[in-house]
Every structure is written in C-alpha cells, then in structure tokens.
Image: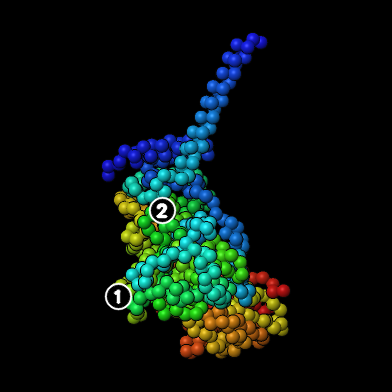
Amino acid sequence: MKDADLKKILVALAGLSTLLLLLVMAAIFSVVFLYFPPVGRSLENSESIEKFEILSDEIQNGFHVETGFVEGEGLQLVIANCTNCHSAKLVTQNRFTKEGWTNVIRWMQETQGLWDLGNNEEVIVAYLAKYYAPEARGRRKALQVEWYDLE
Amino acid sequence: MKKGKGKQRRAFIKNSAYSILASLVGMEIVFANKMPVGYEPIIFQEKESLKSLGKEASLTVLNDKPWNVETPVHLLDDQVTPASKMFIRNNGLLPDRIKLEDWTLTLQGESVKSTKTYSMSDIKDKFRHYSYHLVLECGGNGRGEFYPPTEGNQWGVGAVSCAKWTGIRLKDLLQDVGINNDAVYIGYHGLDSHLSGDPNKEAISRGIPLWKALQEETLLAFALNDEELPLAHGFPLRLVAGGFPASASGKWLKALSVRNKVHDGSKMESPSYRIPISPIEPGSSVDEDNMRIIESMPVRSIITYPKSGAQLPFGRKLNIRGHAWAGEEAVKQVEYSIDFGSTWQLCNLEKPINRLAWQHFSATIEFPIKGYYEVWVKAIDMKGVSQPMVVPAWNPKGYLNNACHRIAVKLT
C-alpha cells in the first residue's frame, strides 16, 4: 500500500469518527439539556394544556397502570394536568363532591401555582367527582381486620 | 401571551430534545409541544425510593411525590423509633445532599439585632450539645377517619415517632445572635423546593412562637439516634419542636427569621395547620378569623403490640403494650377496655425519659369467654383531658383526630 493511500484512509477515518463524536455529543447534549433545563422547572408559558400523553396508556382492570387513576371520561386530561407537581397518589387518596374538588383546585391555583384549566376544568371536576366521590360513613368505621395466629 | 425570542429558541431545542429522547425510549410523546416549558414528564424524573431514603420496605407510601410515608402502627413498637421506621411528611421536593462546607444558617428578620450567618462548625463548636427524646407527630395524623373527608394525605395513626434528637438549643443561638424585645415568632426556611418548581415559592415555611423557641427541649438538631441526620429528615440541620405539629419542625434549614409578628410563610395561612376556634358543624366552611394555629398536639395513645387481628386460644393471657403522649403535657394515666368502652382497666405506665417524650404502657388482659374483641386504649393527660372514643371535632383540613386506638383480637 502506498503512503498516499494510507493517508487517504486515515483522513476518511478521522472524518468519520469526528462525525460520530459530534452525533454522540449532540445526543448527550440534548439529554443533559432535558434533565437540567436552563431556567429550572419554571412556570412561565404555562398556558392551559390541551391534551398530551406522556405515559403509556395501558389500562388493566379499569385502572390506568402507571398512575392508578380509574379509567373514564376525562382521564387523559387529569393525567395531563394533575400529575406534574405531585404524584397521582395525592389525588386518588382524596374523596370530594364537585364543590369540594373545585375548592381544592382553587386552593392550588391561589397558593400552589396551578394554572387556569380553562374549558378542561369542567371535564376534570366531573371525572374527579364521579370516580373519587365521598362515601357516607358514620362517626367511626368497623375495624378492617386481617387475622393471624399470635405466636 | 407573546413569547420572547430566547424562550422560543429554548422551547424549540427542548422539543427536539424530547423527540430524540422519545425515540430513545421508544415511546411517542403525544402533544409534547403543548407541555409547559420546563416540565419534565414523570418518566424522565429521577427515581427516589423507600430504600434510597433509608426506609424499610414495610412502610406505607401514601404519596411518592412529595414523599409521604406512614409507619404501620405495629412497627412503632420500639421505645426509640429507628430512622428506618420514621414516618415522612414532605411538602416539597427533597433538596440535593448539600456539602457541609457549602452550607450556612442565616439568622434574619425584623427582630434580630443584626443578620448573622453560621457555619456547621460554628454551630457544633460554639454551643453546648443536648439530646432529648421528642415526639414528632403530623398535625394530620388520623385524618383518614374524618367524615366528610378532608383534603390531604389520608393518614392512619402512624404519622408519629419518638426518637433521640441531638443538637443545640435554639434559645442559645437566639441569645448569641441577639433578638429585639418585640420578637414574637421564629419562622424557618428550608432548602426543599416547591412542587411547582417555581423558585420564588417555598414548599413550607412555618415556625414556632417565641415561648416555644425558648424551651430547653427545642433543638436545632444535627443528629438522629446518634447518627448524622438522614436526608429524608432534614440533613444537615433541622428544627425539632416536640409536642407541636411536626410541620413546625422545619427540615433542611437554611435560614431562621426572627419575626415581630406571627410568621407569614407558606402554610402559615388559613386553613393550613389551623382549626376552628368555635366548633362548627361537620362539612361546613369556616371564616378565617374563626381559625387558630395549632400549637400543642392533643393526648393520644397507640397499641404497638400485638398487631391488630391476633387470634389466640381461649385461656391464654394477652400482653399488650404501646406508647402515649400529650403534646406539651405529660400523660397521667392509660386505660384499656375490652367491652367497647363500658369498663376501663388501668395499664402500667412509665414516666417519660424527658419532657415531651412518649411514655410506654403495658397491660396483661384475661378474656372472660371465647369470641371477637376489640382492645381500646385511652390516655389521660395531667390536666384530666382524655381521648374521645369517636372521631372528634371535624375541621376543614382534618387535623387532630385523637380518637382512641383499637385493635381486633379473637379468642378461639
């Protein structure tokens, strides 16, 4: 092999690896950028969100697998607007009427930075009041017991 | 709303980053362009776990963002609660583990003589260290039983702990910095961030009245059970005001404000950590001026052994044990009943190891015939105030349910 050929091959190789390197760096950069947004997780431009799906929409036994929300009309809107700050668990632990859910939303809007939900509010509140409604119970419930033999 | 050029560019880069990442994770992010700038979808957020927080897997996770973790009551059997079993009530996101060299505590506010900053070695070297066993109980402990339901984490009875805290007395620090005569309240500021990510919002910034700040047992703690303070419980320094709702005991401290009025930080406002002054009908709304800040927690007791649901052969005696506490008060007496409160028997009750620590009780029970029983337990404080049998006064946020604890037992 001539020296000139070798040189050509080397140059080509160098070119290729530079390209590869650039690609890898671009990928790393975008990932890093995503994890550490330059402004922190600020709230600017938080217009009401239309609808987006960030999680898989797998439903099992009537529950959305990744969040634990009940399947029903408005589920997507609830996932999109109610799992950004806290997990769905804070929502699903609670039980309110329409009025009660609206009060929680107002409280979060006034004090916790929740955005205006626009026309979606009605659907969201209807979903919550339907699937997470209070069940009447007395002043004290019967004990829920799992029996075991005491050693 | 018109976006600035910078924001547009950022949004563009971010959107393309999302599409790259979406292809990496092999999943489409529908409507990614509609996501507010800066919001990370859950799948991209870093995973903390019970284990990474140093907690036993048997604790109950009420919420994992923010972390709210309850101790099943039978796991509170230790006289001194180990860190691995201690409940967590966080209002915001955990701060990163800060380097001690980079950390300082600033004393500030209208009623401080002059603003002053302390390093950890200032705190540890300049002041005497004290250790106390102190009850920390969430103001919402027991919330899950209120009807109509009240908002927040639906705690059972296990949002409580009593561990050994070591640190310096807050009053020694206040004396060192110097406070004015008009000082009435100490507010705390922590390193945790607000759930919305808004850096101008504090997740929680509550505090204590000056009289509580000046108590001997009120600590700025750097150790828990003789170990360095865990991140989940406020590393590197936290306030511990035993007997008050635990939200008064700020974690991950970065500053304390000496105030000439009641502190007005996040979650000091009504209805947070407040209850009606004059009693209200369950489910009704309350005027702000009819609400007062919760100070001392009420009298309470828990049976930590046996776990509810014990079956044992008729004829065998049952030993029960547990703890009792009463906020700022001590517990005078603990009684148990196996006939739904018709008759009560005395338990053995130990003295607290120090003021504001819980007290251990025990009893041996003989059952008259076979069958289903509930063991109820009731503590009475030094003022003669005891626990109610049913859920007490309803309040909008579901605080202070100290109804007597019950376990089920079957003699077969």
Question: Mark 2 sits on what residue?
Answer: B197
Q: Quick check: marks 1 and 2 in contact, CB under 8 Å?
A: no
Residue drawn at point x = 48 percent, y = 81 percent: B328
- Number of other residues with Cα within 10 Å of mark 1, as a class: few under 14, some 14 to 19, many 20 or more: few
For the point 48% across and 89% down, the residue is B384
Q: Give coordinates of residue A100: x percent, y percent.
A: 36, 64
Q: Which residue is mark 1?
A: B289
User: Is residue A57 something one can see in this rendering?
Assistant: no
Dot 2 amino acid type: Gly
Distance from disc 1 to disc 2, alpha carbons, whole Å, reads 31 Å
Side of B347 where B21 appears, left or right:
left
Looking at the rendered structure, the number of numbered marks drawn on it comes to 2
The amino acid type, in three-letter code, at marker 1 is Asp
Q: Position of residue A93 (x, y in %)?
A: 47, 62
Answer with left or right where residue A21 lies relative to residue B362: left
Return the residue nearer the eye: B306 or B384: B384
Q: State which chain disc 1 sits on.
A: B
Whether residue B320 is visible: yes
Q: Position of residue A46 (x, y in %)?
A: 34, 48
Measured along the vertical axis of the image, is residue B251 above or below residue B337?
above
Q: Is the residue A75 above or below the residue B302 in the image?
A: above
Label 2 element class:
loop
Q: Residues within 10 Å of mark 2 (few under 14, many from 20)?
A: many
The residue depicted at 52 percent of the width and 50 percent of the height is B46
